[in-house]
Amino acid sequence: MLSYYISSCLTVITCLTLGVFVLYKNPRNATHRSLFFLNLSVTLWSAFLFLHYLSTTQEFALLTARLLHIGAVFIPSCYLYFITSLLGINSTKKKIITFSFILSIICLFLSFAPNFVQSVSPKLGFPYYANAGTLYIFWIITFFIISAYSFLLLLKKMSTADASKRNQIRYVIIASSIAFMGGATIYPLWYDIPIVPFGEHFIFLYPIILTAAVLKHKLLDIEIVVRETLIYSLLVGFITIIYLLTVLLTERLFKNIMGYQGLLATAASAIVIAILFTPAKNRIQSIVDKLYMGGARAQIQKEFEKFRVQLEQSDKMKAVATLAAGMAHEVRNPLTAIKTFTEYLPTKFNDATFRKKFVKIVGSEVERINAIVGQLLEFAKPKDLNLQKVNVHDLLNDTLLLLSENMVKDKIALNKDYGDFKAFIYADANKLRHVFFNIFKNAIEAMVNEKKLLTIRTTLGKDLIVEIKDTGYGMDKEQVKRAFDPFFSTKDNGTGLGLSISHSIIKDHHGKIEIKSTPNIGTTVKLFLGK
Amino acid sequence: MKKPKILICDDEEGVQESLALILEMDYESIAVNDGREALDKLKQDNEIKIVLLDIKMPKSNGLEVLKEIKNLRSDIAVIMITGYQTTEMATEAIKLGALDYIIKPINSAAILSSVNKALRQTII
């Protein structure tokens, strides 16, 4: 008997908790709402079943056997409502849903009739078990038809649904099978068929699986709620056992010593429960965590990893698309020239001017394609960094030296405003030099106006910041936004790869690049380098 | 007979030279590097009836330039040339009044046929 108290009590707890949780998560969603109503019906049914098992008088047993139908009659119609909402066909099945609710209401009225639940009598160890009246068969048929119809809808959808929906439906089928099979074992005994209602012990699992199916995409939430539900369900079971054991023991003890003392027995059990409650809760919590959350955490980790890989893949695809579009333009221009000049070569071979142009243009265009390919390879190269302790000030000076000739030729003034600190960081010296070179070159080439001043400032904060400021033609907001796109360039002969490469190098160093620019005033590039 | 004048607007020297080479037999071509220069040239020279216009130039957007050319002189036939092949851009160009849309790397026969068509249209 004890196992029946516990299982009906567990069903009440899991159904009510998860029903309220699902409704709280999204009260406007029809699936969530219908699952709440379904759980509410099962809760009511199970609560009266619990009281029915606890009955000590025949009248109370009969009353609870009738009252449990307040919830039970709505289970099939709420189930149909839930299934149609889940499958997104609740609006097309409106008539049949309404009809099923009407049948439920009819059954509700019938349930108070004396020949619905006729009487109660002792059966298979139960002190009181209900006997079905003549009207009861109407309810059984209604229950069977509506549930079977809902089940068929599920199976039908299973063949056409996509993989993720199919998985969800599979969960619902498992949960429904547990619930209906469990429920079905309760009724044979109503007709004196000697089958023990053992299936009832598993019904509490159905709301857990169903909620998991509905909220599958919110894995973390559901894992937490399922864990809490499990802990408290086990705790209630534990307390009930303690209570019953203590009552039983103290009853015998006190009965022998000082006759029967009901109050003392209850007080003793209350003391035992109070003492054991917290350690028991902690113990159960740690067992559930170990058994359950270990797997859940691993699964969360796995799903997160899968999501991260997908995200990276889609980012990569976007980058490849930008790259391909840019490359089409960059390569098609030199190809146009090479193609046209070769096409005219046989007819114009004797034209000296043509030959001169041919050599100049075809030669330089082939060189250009070669440069694009070279830069692309650099862009796509594996990002193995050769990290070592480097002095950023030294790297800046080395790079400036490489460009000093261009700066003198273009009459560019240089203002080195290095901070008074040792600028050591861990970085790949060659790659960082490459970044500085690209930015300096852009700055130098942008300064076509009269004022030509290149300022390099370094400051030390959370990061080491290198600020490179020019007084060139600058960029508008739209151009700044696209500055890191491969093949985007504001220069007549730029490949548009320099800043893209620099950006990816700095990213590999876990740093950041920021660009601020005003047309005709100049551009400032800020590099944030981790120390 | 005087050769008809064609304006080539492209920032690439290689493309400018290639187009000039294709057209030199029957046309006189003038090359400019960006939209601004193209508009200046069209204002100065009324004899230019056809423009070959690159869509992607560093300092100007070909479609914007097309709009301005059409505002300036609606009788000018504009043929767009581009390295990108997107239907949206082609549709947009035709909507804005471009006569044709040619994809790089260009084909000399396609250029000549398009320019001859443009010339017939400007004469009519």
Image (cartoon, coloured by chain):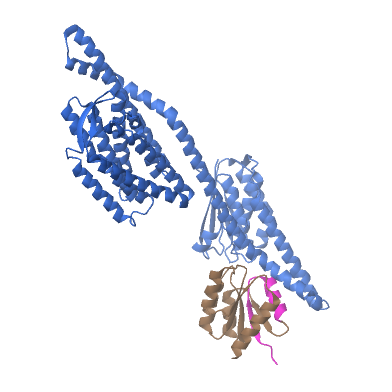
Q: Quadrant of residue A119?
A: top left
- At a point 67% along the width and 78% down the height, the residue shown is B111
- Residue A318 shows up from this direction: yes
Q: Which of A260 and A410 is in front in this view?
A: A260
Which residues are drawn in magenta?
B1-23
Q: In which quarter of the image is residue B17?
A: bottom right
Given residues A489 and A240, the one toward you in this image is: A240
Whether A121 is drawn above or below A260: the answer is below
* The colour assigned to chain B within the rendered structure: brown
If the image is split into quadrants, where does the C terminus of chain A sit? top right
Hue used for the chain lettered A = blue
Residue A36 in view here = no
* Left or right side of A95 for A502: right
User: Is residue B7 on the magenta stretch?
Assistant: yes
Q: Is residue A348 magenta?
A: no
Point out residue A38 in the picture as x, y percentages from the top left corner: 30, 43
Which corner quadrant of the image does residue A376 belong to?
A: bottom right
**Residue extending farthest right:** A350
Query: At which x and y percent is residue A131?
Result: 23, 32
- Using the image as rendered, state which of residue B121 and residue A374 is in the foreground: B121
Q: Going by the picture, which residue comes out furthest to the top?
A: A257
Q: Depth check: A332 or B94 in front?
A: B94
Judged left or right of residue A202, residue A468 is right
Quadrant location, the N terminus of chain A = top left
Residue A259 located left or right of residue A246: left
Q: In this view, does A437 lie to the left or right of A40?
A: right
Residue A262: give x, y in percent of width and height: 18, 16
Residue A153, position as x, y percentages in the image: 39, 50
Report the number of discs: 0
